[in-house]
Image: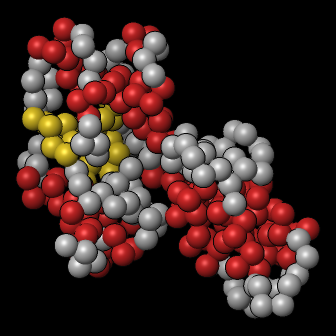
């Protein structure tokens, strides 16, 4: 995720790869890509789960003095489920992803129907761009830092990262193991355990992780216990430095 869209870990992710591991071959498995592609796949077409569904309510809302259509749209975007993981359940994270879409709508549009049609169309287009960004060509996922999507906000990264072309290529490998052995694990760690297992089976030298508590997600099978590799934890320290928070 931090490679294709701006997050608090993006600066650390790019600097770690380019400064420490630029001579390494980068790999990921198909399931990692498939998992990312489901983040903004809103299957439940309900007000609280689907931000596009919420934004369509603009057509029906009464107008109040001092509240613009954009202001109403932001409030609707935030008025979803507060809990859950990124994308499908968390309205705060949905707002990070789609707020710039609302901001891009022409301020002169004052008709609720026209505004609604444009904003929902652009939301769908951004989801499509996200999916296209994650679609490998001939097994290779190529990413240019200047093209990464706005997500948590440009304040999380340096202007240099976005203005200069920094290219990263990742080989996307077929899944080398089925996920059946992980089905009994809690849903919160199931996918991570599966991915760690496959990477260790590939005998990688380094695994980049965004979770300081990653150890609880590594399965106890012989493959994972016997094979040792370097684990590099990505942090938001560089982001805090950019914002003078430390």
Query: Which quarter of the figure is the C terminus placed in?
Result: bottom left
Q: Is residue 60 above or below residue 204?
A: below
Q: Is residue 45 left or right of residue 82?
A: right
Q: Is residue 146 left or right of residue 166?
A: right
Q: Is residue 241 left or right of residue 74?
A: left
Residue 178, image quadrant: top left
Give percent across and percent down for residue 237. 21, 63
- Residue 144 in sight: no
Residue 211, image quadrant: top left
Q: Is residue 240 above or below residue 215?
A: below
Give percent across and percent down for residue 228. 9, 24
Q: Is residue 26 above or below residue 75?
A: above
Give percent across and percent down for residue 214. 26, 34
- Residue 208 in sight: yes
Residue drawn at x 28%, y 18% is 219
Q: Is residue 106 above or below residue 79?
A: below
């Amino acid at each position: 995720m931090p490679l294709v869209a701006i997050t608090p870990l993006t600066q650390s992710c790019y600097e770690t790869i380019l400064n420490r591991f630029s001579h390494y071959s980068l790999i990921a498995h198909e399931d990692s890509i498939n998992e990312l592609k489901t983040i903004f796949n809103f299957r439940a077409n309900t007000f609280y789960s689907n931000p596009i569904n919420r934004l369509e309510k603009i057509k029906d809302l009464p107008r109040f003095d001092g509240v613009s259509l954009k202001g109403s749209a932001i409030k609707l975007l935030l008025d979803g489920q507060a809990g859950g993981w990124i994308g499908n359940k968390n309205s705060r994270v949905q707002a990070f992803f789609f707020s710039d879409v609302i901001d891009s709508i022409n301020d002169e549009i004052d008709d609720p129907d026209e505004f609604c049609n444009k904003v929902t169309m652009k939301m769908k287009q951004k989801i499509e761009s996200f999916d296209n960004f994650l679609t490998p060509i001939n097994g290779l996922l190529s990413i240019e830092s200047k093209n990464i999507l706005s997500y948590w906000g440009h304040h999380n990264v340096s202007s240099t990262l976005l203005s200069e072309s920094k290219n990263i290529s990742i080989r996307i490998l077929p899944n080398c193991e089925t996920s059946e052995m992980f089905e009994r694990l809690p849903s919160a760690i199931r996918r991570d355990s599966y991915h760690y297992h496959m990477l260790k089976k590939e005998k990688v030298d380094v695994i980049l992780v965004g979770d300081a508590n990653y150890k609880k997600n590594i399965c106890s099978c012989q493959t994972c216990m016997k094979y040792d590799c370097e684990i590099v934890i990505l942090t938001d320290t560089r982001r805090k430095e950019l914002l003078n928070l430390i």
